[in-house]
Amino acid sequence: MDVSADALASFAVFATHLNFTHAAAELHISQPALHVKVRKLAQTLGRPLYYREGRRLALTPDGEAVARFARTHDDRLTQFLAEFTGTAPQRPVVLAAGQGAYLYLLGDTIRAALAEEPTRLRLINCNHREMLYAVRTGQAHLGVGVLDVLPDDLTTTELATFPQVLLMPEDHHLAQHESVTLPDLTGERLVVPPQHRPHRVLLERALRSADAEWTVAVEAEGWPLITHFVTLGVGLAIVNGCVPAPPGLIARPVTDLPSVTYQVVHQPSALADPRVATLLDRLPHGAQN
């Protein structure tokens, strides 16, 4: 097979954007030219590399493998040239995670990595599905998130486990208890994520099973805004136990909800890169709250 480095590099950019217009602009080529590169690469490999999903484009499993190889090839070439010329490698380690992980778990790790070498680390802020995609396609070396199902094609390590807690004002009648149950929330107004978000879906399912009648106080995206609404007295909220209770609020574990575990995810071969291994060692493995 005659697979050019240029075709692989172009496909890696396309895999990042999953949009021909945006990828072509980054590559400084025309959109039809990029179409040709991707089509010829797929023809050379004899496999479809992407498909259309409604209005979106998505990579096939073979496309994910090609994108991962393309980025690994680029990293190895950069590393080789740095060693050959005696210069420091310019490629950073890429970490993908969501808002909660960045706010409450990864701060010390990021601060230490940047203090040692500011260009050593690049961050991607994304949800857990986007995190898995970034790791699978080689866009990120490490990913951190809460996973419903552990992927069988990636290596996962438990970082931290927290109970789910009810966040409420200190003078609320449930604050007198050491812990609460879902039936205790009957009649309460709750601050919840928007519909179809994973936490909202799981919460509604659990409350329904517990026969707890509740109402939506307001929908909010992200733990900081959810917490802020609780401080304003809008309603109560169930959050991950890593979320600190601001002054005036108190957190009580919800005993009939499962704990939440943050996992770090990477390709099985990722730790061959000592920079990635060093960053992984700095993460707070096995922390409990």
Image: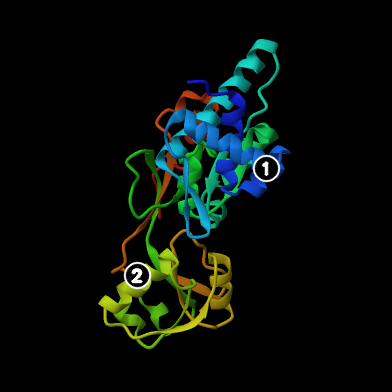
- Res 214 → quadrant: bottom left
Helix, strand or loop at disc 2? Answer: loop
Neighbor class of circle 2 (other Cα within 10 Å; few <14, some 14-19, many 20+) is many
Neighbor class of circle 1 (other Cα within 10 Å; few <14, some 14-19, many 20+) is many
**In front: 13, or 162?**
13
The x and y percentages for residue 164 are 39, 65
- Res 10 → quadrant: top right
Q: Is residue 37 left or right of residue 132?
A: right
- Label 1 and label 2: CA atoms lie apart by 50 Å
Could you tell me the amino acid type at mark 1? Ala
Residue 224 seen: yes
**In front: 223, or 37?**
37
Q: Give the label, 1 or 2, closer to the camera.
A: 1
**In front: 178, or 51?**
51
**In front: 104, or 289?**
104
The x and y percentages for residue 268 are 39, 31
Residue drawn at the location 52% of the way across and 63% of the way down: 244
Q: Establish if 228 lies above or below 271.
A: below
- The residue labelled by disc 2 is 254
Furthest residue in direction bottom, as rendered: 187
Could you tell me the amino acid type at mark 2? Val
Helix, strand or loop at disc 1? Answer: helix
The x and y percentages for residue 83 are 64, 14
Q: Establish if 9 lies above or below 61.
A: above
- The residue labelled by disc 1 is 24
Q: What coloring was used for the rendering? A: rainbow
Image quadrant containing the C terminus? bottom left
- Res 78 → quadrant: top right
Residue 252 seen: no
Q: Establish if 166 lies above or below 278.
A: below
Residue drawn at the location 42% of the way across and 32% of the way down: 46
Residue drawn at the location 30% of the way across and 68% of the way down: 255
